Image (spheres, helix red, strand yellow):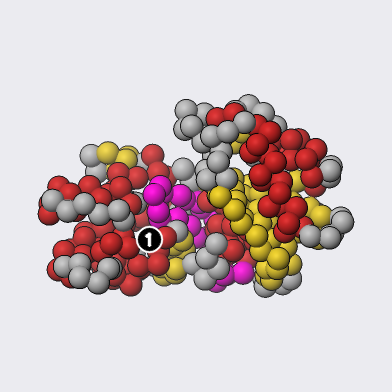
Amino acid sequence: MKLIGVDIGGSHISAAQVVLDNHHAEIANFHEADVDTYGSVERIISDWSEVIQRAKGDLIDVKIGIAMPGPYDYENGVSLIKDQGKMAALYQLSVKDLLAESLAIPASQIAFTNDAEAFLSGESYAGAGKEFQNSIGITLGTGLGSAIKVHDVVKDAKLWTAPFRDGIAEDYIGTGWFKNYAQQKYNLQISGVKDLLAEGFDPKVSSELFTVFGRALGEFLFPYLIRLHTEGVILGGKISLAGDYYLPATKSYLETMGCPVSINVSELGEESALIGACMPFLDS
């Protein structure tokens, strides 16, 4: 049985053949595309199927693991996403059955996994989380994704809505915070972290933003690290790539609090979700 890993977001899909062997993963025949998920059911399913079919190539007997953002009934492959515009046409439909029909394979050969769980599962199997029994995976970007691993069990942590300071975690941990802080404190308009690293940007300003952000990340993580006896944190998402600039402040805060855990940046990048999406088939 051959494995196809798929990572679906609100406007993008990637898919590839995945080979898993003793905590090593190989990715082949990678394909990706932008998809307008504001359209009809038929259009969305057709566009997704086209990319999956290209990744599948001439393989005949395949199992397809799909990483998908929530809310979702992952066991049955039913979309519960509404009020976001994206994927609205799929609300309460069995995407599993629709894709199975489109791809001409049994629905039993398709499995859905939360995207944050897939990220942490992939990194734990073959990447930056291999050494940890208990870990937290955090994806940092436009939104805040989170998952928790305790031994062999990985679960979506849904920490983006967790109360934090005078709001919720996502108010402080993500692209939105950088944009708001730069605007409020320096009257600067930035589109995201990459602007802070651009040539000509004031290094004192970027240094302050990264330091404030890094401390907030440590403050946010601390209670969960203690409560879950966490050995390490794995960071993914676009903002993780700038880790050298803010992680010193994160680690300094955690050390001050007596909680010096390892913080590793993703080794697998976008491949982690593709690998993690196939994990349900590993022992089947």
| Amino acid type shown at disc 1 | Ile
Is residue 23 magenta-colored?
no
Q: Nearer the viewer, residue 231 or 250?
A: 250
The residue that appears at 58% across and 33% down in the rendered structure is 39
Q: Secondary structure at mark 1?
A: helix
Q: Answer left or right for 79 relative to 201.
A: right
Residue 250, by quadrant, is bottom left
Is residue 145 magenta-colored?
yes
x, y percent for residue 234: 47, 63
Is residue 209 something that shows in the picture? yes
Image quarter hosting the N terminus:
bottom right
Residue 35, by quadrant, is top right
The residue that appears at 40% across and 63% down in the rendered structure is 240
Question: According to the image, label 1 marks what residue?
Answer: 239
x, y percent for residue 268: 55, 68
Q: Is residue 201 above or below residue 9?
A: below
Is residue 231 something that shows in the picture? no
Q: Is residue 277 above or below residue 95?
A: below
Image quarter hosting the C terminus:
bottom right
Residue extent of the magenta highlight: 126-151
Q: Nearer the viewer, residue 166 or 274?
A: 274
x, y percent for residue 190: 25, 54
The residue that appears at 70% across and 68% down in the rendered structure is 28
Q: Nearer the viewer, residue 231 or 160?
A: 160
x, y percent for residue 274: 63, 58
